[in-house]
Image: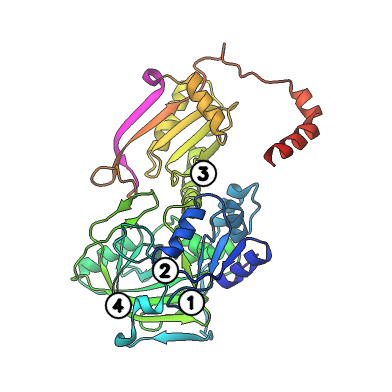
Amino acid sequence: MAFSGIKDYIAYLKENGELLTLSTPLSPKFEISTILSELGKKEAPAFLFENVKGHQLHVIGNLLGTKKRLSMALGVDQENFFENALSKLEKRIPPVLVKDRSPKEVITQKQKIDLLKLLPILTHYSNDSGPYITSGITSARDPKNGVIGRGLHRMEVRGKNELGISLLNPPLSEIYAQYKKENRRMEVATVIGVDPAILIASISKIPRGMDKLSVAGGLKGKPIPMVKAETVDIDIPAHAEIVIEGFIDPKGKEKDGTLGESSGYYMTFAKSPTIRVTAISYQKGAYFHAIVPWGLEVDNLLCLIHGIDFVPKMKREIPSLKQIHLIPGTFGSHVVMSIVTDHKGEVRRALSLALSFPNIKKAIIVDEDVDPEDNQEVEWALATRFQGDRDLIVLPDLRGQPIDPSSKEGFLATKIGMDATRPKKEGFEKVDVPEEVKSRLASILKNLKGKEKK
């Protein structure tokens, strides 16, 4: 399905039994995040918080907390999810500018702008420095080519009309560096509550000079409608629930607060600039989209985006790779791959190449008789085919992920590769029952497995 905005997607989830509505009054400080955090560690429905203390706006969370809902958002078959998602993400349809006819509330007067009074911004974890926006997609115009760069960046509430923004990744980190070099103000616009295709596109990796909303258009199969922002020269998605506009003064102080990050640890990053808010607008009956940083929802998104970059490149360079599985719960940093080869040199080459990707910290390779998605089989292969002095690769000081708290200065990490393939063909044949008998008893086995799950 093609959704016109987040409201359409929420309605679709409700129709399909994927939405749980909570009417209990809950505070945006810790209470809503506790529900999302505790229930979002395992597969759970999306949650609509109808009664947020001190606010008229509703909060929606755990939208993409399962692969089923992620496949719903992208309109792809869950069984062949990765392949179908990859083909859609490779398409490009540029956004189009339309007239803004949506009824909305617009606040532009400085004395009336109070972020915490207007928006139900969550305080997530015990040691967070304050409330954070974690689902805001921020846009800024590249001074070099005029193209608008976009990205999902954490934003700390620093005052009634001030937001900190952690600019660690391109294109916005590069765009801000250019504005700073030219000593010019950088106008920004942040949208909250958008079609999931736009959210997914905002964290995709594409070359600088291309609008990420062209990726969103490819996902949807039609252009994303855009409108002009109220106080800054930036085009934004027309159906966004909430828009925050402002500018960054390159002369301003750069600091950062503390947030419980996607890796499951409290993290503070250096040099985080401050946005001076010039306008806030929101649609009638707007939904504030909340993403709790550590949970299945973020893990699903990171595995999808890292996989889209990682898998095609690996298979292109190493054609003998059969399956590639990013391990859940590792925010896309651990991978298991199966390979069809008898050459140890090819295995070592595949491991070294995998570890050269910034997001990959640990890589395991198994033979084609081992299912990379079956943890028990992978551990069995490590227990019976791997020896540390012979099959372990250790590569120090490679580029890692900023959210890994154990990394060195400059986000450098020591990475490991594990060769869990057969040392030799003889003596390492996996035990199994005859395939002909398995096929003959397939219906009985399926029935028994179904009863076992119950």
Q: Nearer the viewer, mark 1 or mark 3?
A: 1
At horizontal 23% and vertical 73% (from top left) the residue drawn is 249
Binning the other alpha carbons within 10 Å of mark 4 as few (below 14), some (14 to 19) or many (20 upward) gives some
- Residue at numbered disc 3: 312
- Residue 28, label in figure: 2
Q: What is the total number of numbered labels drawn onto the structure image?
A: 4
**Side of 442 where 155 appears, left or right:** left
- Sequence-wise, which precedes: disc 2 or disc 3? 2
**Side of 30 where 215 appears, left or right:** right
Q: Nearer the viewer, mark 2 or mark 3?
A: 2
Q: CA distance from mark 1 to mark 3?
A: 41 Å
Task: Decide whether residue 227 is among the magenta residues.
Answer: no
- Sequence-wise, which precedes: disc 1 or disc 2? 2
Q: CA distance from mark 4 to mark 1?
A: 18 Å
Q: Which amino acid does the dot numbered 2 rest on?
A: Pro
- Residue 160, label in figure: 4
- Residue 57, label in figure: 1
